[in-house]
Image (tube, rainbow, N blue to C red):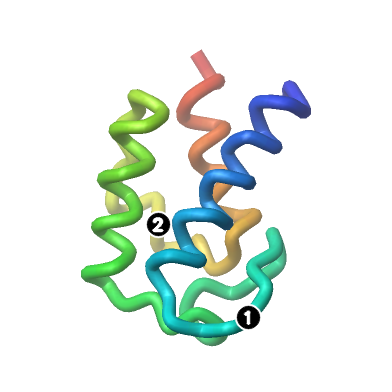
Amino acid sequence: MTESNYNEITSLLCDRLSTLTNSNIEITPDTNLISQLSIDSIKLLNLIMEIEDTFDVSIPINALADVQTVRELADLVYKIKFAS
């Protein structure tokens, strides 16, 4: 795993999530998307579309079933982007 690419993905996710939510929670890789940030399906789909555009990837919707934290989402994006 290239540290700089992974950190870029994580940083972008944290930045985008902070603008999508109205909470004052500090967003870290361990932040839970649903229980702590109250990300609903609409916000999640908007975030996924932004991620796909930014990183030129296609994220299968069924791959999101196991994603609960920012770190898990970053792992998924990294795996899809750099697995080939």
Residue 7 image offset from top left, x and y in percent: 70, 37
Q: What residue does disc 1 label?
A: 25
Q: Nearer the viewer, residue 79 or 25?
A: 25
Crowdedness near tag 2: few (<14), some (14–19) or many (≥20) residues, C-alpha within 10 Å: some
Q: Residue at x 69, y 59 (%)?
A: 29
Marks 1 and 2, how far apart in space? 22 Å
- Is residue 25 placed above or below 20 in the rendered structure? below
Quarter of the N terminus within the rendering: top right
Residue 47, placed above or below residue 76: below
Q: Are marks 1 and 2 in contact (CB under 8 Å)?
A: no
Q: Secondary structure at mark 1?
A: loop
Left or right: where 56 falls relative to 38: left
| Residue at the farthest right position | 3
Tag count in the figure? 2
Residue at 62%, 46% in the rendered image: 11
Q: Which numbered dot is residue 50?
A: none
Q: Nearer the viewer, residue 48 or 14?
A: 14
Task: Say few, some or many: other residues with alpha carbon within 10 Å of mark 1 (under 14 / 14 to 19 / 20 or more).
Answer: few
Q: Is residue 48 left or right of residue 30?
A: left
Label annotation for residue 64: 2
Q: Whole-percent x and y of residue 82?
A: 55, 20
The amino acid on which the numbered mark 1 sits, given as a three-letter code, is Ile
Identity of the amino acid at label 2?
Leu
Q: Is residue 43 left or right of residue 17?
A: left
Q: Nearer the viewer, mark 1 or mark 2?
A: 1
- The secondary element bearing badge 2 is classed as helix
Q: Residue at x 31, y 77 (%)?
A: 40
Query: On the image, which quarter does residue 57 sit in?
Result: top left
Position in image of residue 79 (x %, y %): 55, 32
The image position of residue 72, as x and y in percent, is 60, 55
Q: Foreground: 53 or 23?
A: 23
Sequence-first tag of 1 and 2: 1
